[in-house]
Image: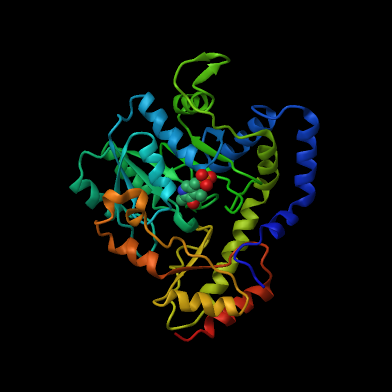
Amino acid sequence: MIPYLDLKRVTEFFHEEISEATQRVIESGWYIRGKECENFEMQFAKFCGTKFCVGVGNGLEALTLIFRALILLKKLNVGDAVFVPSNTYIASILAINEAGLKPILVEPDEKTFNISLKNIQEAFAKNPEAKAILAVHLYGRVIPGKELAKFAKENHLLLIEDAAQGHGAKQDEIRAGAFGDAAGFSFYPGKNLGALGDAGAVTTSDENLAKTIRALANYGSEQKYVNAFRGMNSRLDELQAAILAKKLPHLDAENLRRQKIAKRYLQEIQNEAIQLPDAGNAGEHVWHIFAIRTKNREALQEHLKLRGIGTLVHYPIPPHKQKAYAEWNALSFPIAENIAETELSLPLYPQLTENEISQIIEAVNAYRP
Ligand SMILES: *Cc1c(COP(=O)(O)O)cnc(C)c1O
């Protein structure tokens, strides 16, 4: 059996370092808002190339806090429109709603699964009232960050990144998390940088924004029992921070391993019934998800299952077809719908062996629709 993701094996790889770190935190007697979190925040800001990082509870709250803080700082107003890709994971859209803003769905570039500069230019021509872009490094593919940042600046739009799938991805020397005004990260266990529970972070180089987010995430308080805003509780705890600080130094090597596996899939999967993802520039994408596409997805999924290979679909129902967004159900976003109908994710994690990768390639190549 080759499961889609074997988290037990991933954690086993870091066993000693994680045990050392958790033991230290357990014995310290200090579990929230301490030096472990501070240390990880410093490391992660440095890694991403931003001035600040604020550890928070999870990825959804990281994004929500960014939008709420931008409203408090009067850079956005409640009700403002925010562009977001129509094929994203629903959390991107929930964050916009949660902050009282209005999501405008934008179809992605079908080749990259991400929004391109052209997509945004067209959307902005139709919706000139929009005030921000939430760009998503979906599947670990870096966004065209420099182009989007330039367009955003010229048109007085804010650029926020959903980097929950993009830890370490880069365009030239700029990392995911450093292109826009702020970025939200998730350290959900299955992400490229994963905790052993829920965790997240915001990166930004705007000091005021970082300060506001830190206060908002701690009941709206900068000074204990003095509340400047109506905040929430969303904090990165010491245990998770210590674990993440142990894993972060390995992230580049792990992403390199992901790139090597992706390269093998791209070179060795040869099947007319299957469309491979665009290769992109080597060294850019961090392959959180290896998304292949095929017409009769369920048949391929069953074929692989019979050969002991686990797969997943990211994502079977696009946000505008979800019951949660009933008001959008009648709208048509053909690219997002087509991706949702045809996408299948192959196992791709650093701890896969060459032998397992070969098995997966052979099984995919043996598929006949
Ligand atoms: C995982 C994910 C999130 C949410 O992160 P959580 O930590 O699970 O709240 C947001 N956006 C994208 C694109 C994600 O993949």
The residue closer to the viewer here, 321 or 208, is 321
Q: Is residue 126 above or below residue 70?
A: below
Q: Is residue 144 left or right of residue 81?
A: right
Q: Quadrant of the N terminus?
A: bottom right
Is residue 173 visible to the viewer in this orientation of the structure?
A: no
Q: Is residue 40 above or below residue 93?
A: above
> Which color scheme did the rendering employ for the protein?
rainbow
Q: Is residue 346 left or right of residue 35?
A: left
List the single residue furthest toward the top: 226
The residue closer to the viewer here, 252 or 187, is 187
Q: Going 43% across and 83% down the picture, which residue do you hit?
A: 272
Q: Quadrant of the C terminus?
A: bottom left
Number of numbered discs on residues: 0
Q: Is residue 136 above or below residue 236?
A: below
Location of residue 46 by image quarter:
top right
Where residue 239 appears, x then y in whole percent? Answer: 70, 37
Is residue 154 visible to the viewer in this orientation of the structure?
A: yes
Where residue 206 appears, x then y in whole percent? Answer: 45, 29
Q: Going 39% across and 60% down the picture, which residue do you hit?
A: 317
Where residue 344 appears, x then y in whole percent? Answer: 47, 69
Q: Is residue 261 left or right of residue 181?
A: right
Where residue 351 appears, x then y in whole percent? Answer: 68, 63
Q: Is residue 263 left or right of residue 330?
A: right
